Image: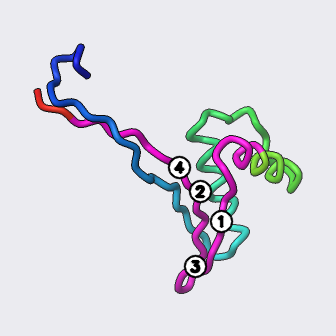
């Protein structure tokens, strides 16, 4: 950031979890996995069977950590924790 002309530049980590919902635990899980598939460009990865979904979930867990699913009101939330780096400065 200093090279780009910012002064008093600071970088900090903050929690920035993925949180996606579904009407059932399975729907929340699949919504999360489909989001990850599209976000990370894994479009060639087919999701035609339960084994395909399980393989994608295992890849996500190895890379990003375990997904949690919990009931919230009348739906379910799938959450995958991640940290984001946030940079601020004065220009």
Q: In which quarter of the image is residue 78?
A: bottom right
Looking at the image, which is closer to me, 47 or 5? 5
| Residue on which the image places disc 3 | 75
Residue at image coords 79%, 52%: 53
State the CA–CA distance, disc 4 to disc 1.
13 Å
Tell which circle, 1 or 2, labels the residue nearer the N-terminal end. Answer: 1
Residue at 64% x, 66% y: name it: 28
Compute the Cα span from label 3 to label 2. Answer: 17 Å
Q: How many neighbours does mark 3 have within 10 angstroms: few (below 14), some (14-19), or many (20 or more)?
A: some
Q: What element carries label 4?
A: loop
Secondary element type, mark 1: strand
What residue lies at 53% left-to-right and 85% top-to-bottom? 73
In the image, residue 60 lies at what x, y percent? 70, 46
**Closer mark to the observer between disc 3 and disc 1:** 1
Q: Name the residue under label 4.
A: 82
Farthest-out residue, left: 91
- Confirm or deny contact between disc 1 and disc 2 (CB under 8 A): yes
Q: Is residue 64 magenta?
A: yes
Image mark for residue 80: 2
Determine if the magenta segment contains residue 86. Answer: yes
Q: Name the foreground residue: 83 vs 69.
A: 83
Q: Do the residues labelled 4 and 2 touch (CB within 8 Å)?
A: yes
Count of numbered marks: 4
Q: Nearer the viewer, mark 3 or mark 4?
A: 4
Q: Where in the figure is residue 65, as x and y percent of width and height? A: 67, 51
C-alpha separation, residue under disc 4 versus residue under disc 2: 7 Å
In the image, which residues are magenta? 59-88
Q: Residue 68 carries which label?
A: 1
First reached walking from the N terminus: tag 3 or tag 2: 3
């Amino acid at each position: 950031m200093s090279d780009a002309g910012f002064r008093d530049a600071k970088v900090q980590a903050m929690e920035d979890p993925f949180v996606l919902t579904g009407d059932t635990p399975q729907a929340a899980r699949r919504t999360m996995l489909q989001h990850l598939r599209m976000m990370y460009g894994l479009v060639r990865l087919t999701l035609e069977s339960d084994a395909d979904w399980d393989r994608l979930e295992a890849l996500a867990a190895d890379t990003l950590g375990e997904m949690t699913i919990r009931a919230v009101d009348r739906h379910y939330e799938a959450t995958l924790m991640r940290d984001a780096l946030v940079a601020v400065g004065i220009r």
